[in-house]
Image (cartoon, rainbow, N blue to C red):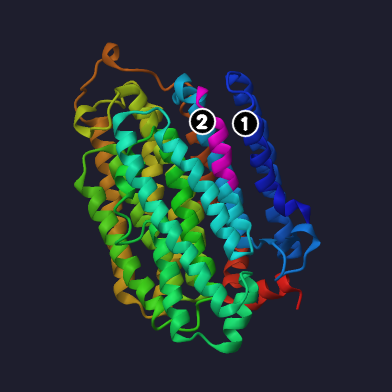
Amino acid sequence: MNNLVILPILIPLITATLLLLLPKRIKLQKLISVISLSFATIASIVLVHKVYTDGIQTLEIGNWRPPFGIVLVADMFASLLVLTGTIVSFMCILFAFRSIGKGRESYYYYAFTQFLLTGVMGAFLTGDIFNLFVFFEVMLMASYALIVIGGTRSQLRESLKYVLVNVISSALFVLALAYIYGLMGTLNMADISNKVAESGQSGILTVVAILFLIVFGLKGGIFPLYFWLPGSYHAPPYAITALFGALLTKVGVYAIFRTFTLIFYHEPEITHTIIAILAGITILIGAIGAIAYWDVKKILIYNIVTAVGVIIYGVALANETGYAGSIYYLVHDMVIKGALFLLGGAMFAVTGTDNIKKMGGLIKRHPLLGWMFFIAAMALAGIPPLSGFVGKVLLVQGGLEANHYVFVGVMLLSSLLVLYSVMKIFMNCFFKAEVLSEKEEQGSTKGLIYPSVILLALSAFLGLGAEFVYPYVWQAAETLMDPSIYIQAVLKE
């Protein structure tokens, strides 16, 4: 038993509860948020090191042995996402200090962000598929509040769609849970995996697997279930969109990885073929959407869709190289999407618009902002030696090993389209003829740049320090490749 496993969940939960009691003490809320996320980051770093040196860590809640009791499980895959998610959330909070506004701060922005983080961390660490649903709901309830806070017309309109989609998704999730419990008689993921391996994946279980894919696909934003994402993520301010883009879709992606590597891996010719096809179409749809728009936030949002397709493509490969590539790319994407949205928020603070055609010449007065955006764009497109390159190289290698030549071609083509979409922002917003004079600028970038500096430094470390990071990623891939490692750690068999 290791109480370290629960700290990434417990710290934001206690913090959120405390912040609810301080509605008018905004400065104190900010201080508590910084202290909380500092401790959460330290706990996450220690957890990653503990898992790397001592193997998978588990915590049996109430000392009830699984499969009868609730268990939290920190393998390397979950631990890396916990650490990355905590760091990105920390930077989004720091950005919000100067951008979110007193109105939203007084309506519990910091408390809801901590509740969101509680749900995300719980989803990564739970070993029970019903509690995966519970933590999804915690995360979603917080996101409902964050997407509507501020009360603008676009937020209210998009929040209705967002809530409706997720209510339907949650209903399907409960239905899928009922089927899996009826078939297996357990909700512990390790125990389900054991029983499926013993009895074989029947036709009805494959249908249940597809139902889970629909549920997690809705939450993750894969084709054709991404339709709600561009509008819903466009409505709130950048500090909130950065959180959503870096974390929320990644929880759906994580759930696909966890279930289709641990439980539903016995009929890959059906399940994994469907995932491969959906991944390829998702990549193309996201890339086409990104090049079609002249709106900074919309372009970045469609690049979320592209990244989701690239990441879940690793599930279809079902080899260690492909898994390692997806994990590396997932960590990279959480970091770089956070950085890009925060940089986009700084551009919005200066110009008061997301319309690329109404910007121009920003490099003259904001050179640091411009060149930081350029570096982030290069990382997103997978240009070496930044972080996106390592993940894509591993995915290409895994694709070639699996003879998925068409999908490798689609992924490489998408890299060019992604590069074009973000360079369109860079060239038009920073080097085009000046549109706004210094007096016409809406605000300044004071206090808005340094969170992105930290995220870009982390991205550079993931690329240049790949030799240091890769053993952690490979350990995570080995666990996904061999479910018995996870099962033995949880059930102590």
| Quarter of the rendering containing residue 81 | bottom right
The structure residue drawn at horizontal position 70% and vertical position 71%, both measured from the top left corner, is 67
Q: Is residue 287 above or below residue 312?
A: above
Q: Is residue 109 magenta?
A: yes
Q: Report the front residue among 1 and 372.
A: 1
* Residue type indicated by callout 1: Ser
Q: Position of residue 191 (x, y in %)?
A: 65, 75
Q: Is residue 42 left or right of residue 421?
A: right
Is residue 383 visible in this depiction of the protein?
A: no
Residue 33 disc label: 1
Q: Is residue 290 magenta?
A: no
Q: Main secondary structure of the magenta part?
A: helix
Q: Secondary structure at mark 1?
A: helix
Quarter of the image that includes the N terminus: bottom right
Q: Secondary structure at mark 2?
A: helix
Q: Position of residue 196 (x, y in %)?
A: 57, 82
Which callout, 2 or 1, points to the residue nearer the camera? Answer: 2
Q: Is residue 367 left or right of residue 30?
A: left
Is residue 115 visible in this depiction of the protein?
A: yes
Q: Are marks 2 and 1 in contact (CB under 8 Å)?
A: no
| Quarter of the rendering containing residue 274 | bottom left
Q: Which residue is denoted by mark 2 in the rendering?
A: 109
Q: Is residue 133 above or below residue 42?
A: below
Q: Position of residue 407 (x, y in %)?
A: 32, 71
Q: Report the front residue among 112 and 366.
A: 112
The structure residue drawn at horizontal position 61% and vertical position 87%, both measured from the top left corner, is 198
Quarter of the image that includes the C terminus: bottom right
Question: Magenta residues?
Answer: 106-118
